[in-house]
Amino acid sequence: MPDSIPPEIFDCRRCGDCCLGEGGIILDERDVARLAAHLNQAVADFLMRCTELCSGRTRVRTAPDGYCLFYDHAIHGCAVHPARPDICRAWPFFRGNLVDKYSWRLAQDACPGIVAAAGHAAFARAGREYLRRHNLVRRDDAAAPCALTSIDRDDAAE
């Protein structure tokens, strides 16, 4: 479970649903450096072996089964968890889920760990705090995953 998220807001079930699918794990330079170091690979080797470019952004490749390259079925989790990308560290506190109650409800369909009973306002407060505390909010960074991008208006809405 992501550290310091109250279980009454989000209680990870280790189902792996957030690790399934192509294209969602966008990496920035900080992620690339952290993952390459964790895997004891040169950055160039890591990029060649584990990533691909899509629309000018670097993303983690998927394995043939459709899961993230780093998803380990034996442990039902991330094989690089201590060095996981910021987009993975932020789940389920993506921008859309924080600012839009409808997106938050849709996310519940995909993630059994999101606790609906907490309500959207409590989820959004806890999410913004978690993102700030873990330095996961990006501002005006074209290379950052859009799910992590925040605008002042969103933060002021608390």
Image (cartoon, rainbow, N blue to C red):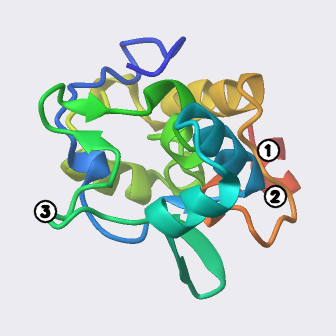
Question: Is 152 on the left-hand or right-hand side of 71?
Answer: right
Can you tell which quarter of the image residue 142 is in?
A: bottom right
Q: Nearer the viewer, mark 2 or mark 3?
A: 3
Q: Residue at x 41, y 71 (%)?
A: 23
Sequence-wise, which precedes: disc 2 or disc 3?
Answer: 3
User: From this viewpoint, is residue 113 visible?
Assistant: no
- Identify which residue, 156 or 33, lies in the foreground: 33
Q: Is residue 130 above or below residue 88?
A: above
Q: Quadrant of the N terminus?
A: top left
Callout 2 amino acid: Ile
Which mark identifies residue 151? 2
Which mark identifies residue 155? 1
Q: Nearer the viewer, mark 3 or mark 1?
A: 3
Residue 157 in the image: x percent, y percent? Answer: 76, 45
User: From this viewpoint, is residue 23 visible?
Assistant: yes
How far apart, in angstroms, are the residues tagged by discs 2 and 3?
36 Å
How far apart, in angstroms, are the residues tagged by discs 1 and 2?
7 Å
> Does dot 1 land on a helix, a strand or a loop?
helix
- Identify which residue, 44 or 127, lies in the foreground: 44
Which mark identifies residue 65? 3
Q: Residue at x 32, y 54 (%)?
A: 69
Callout 1 amino acid: Asp
Asked if the residues shown at circle 1 and circle 2 are in contact, with their CB atoms under 8 angstroms apart, the answer is: yes
Which mark identifies residue 140? none
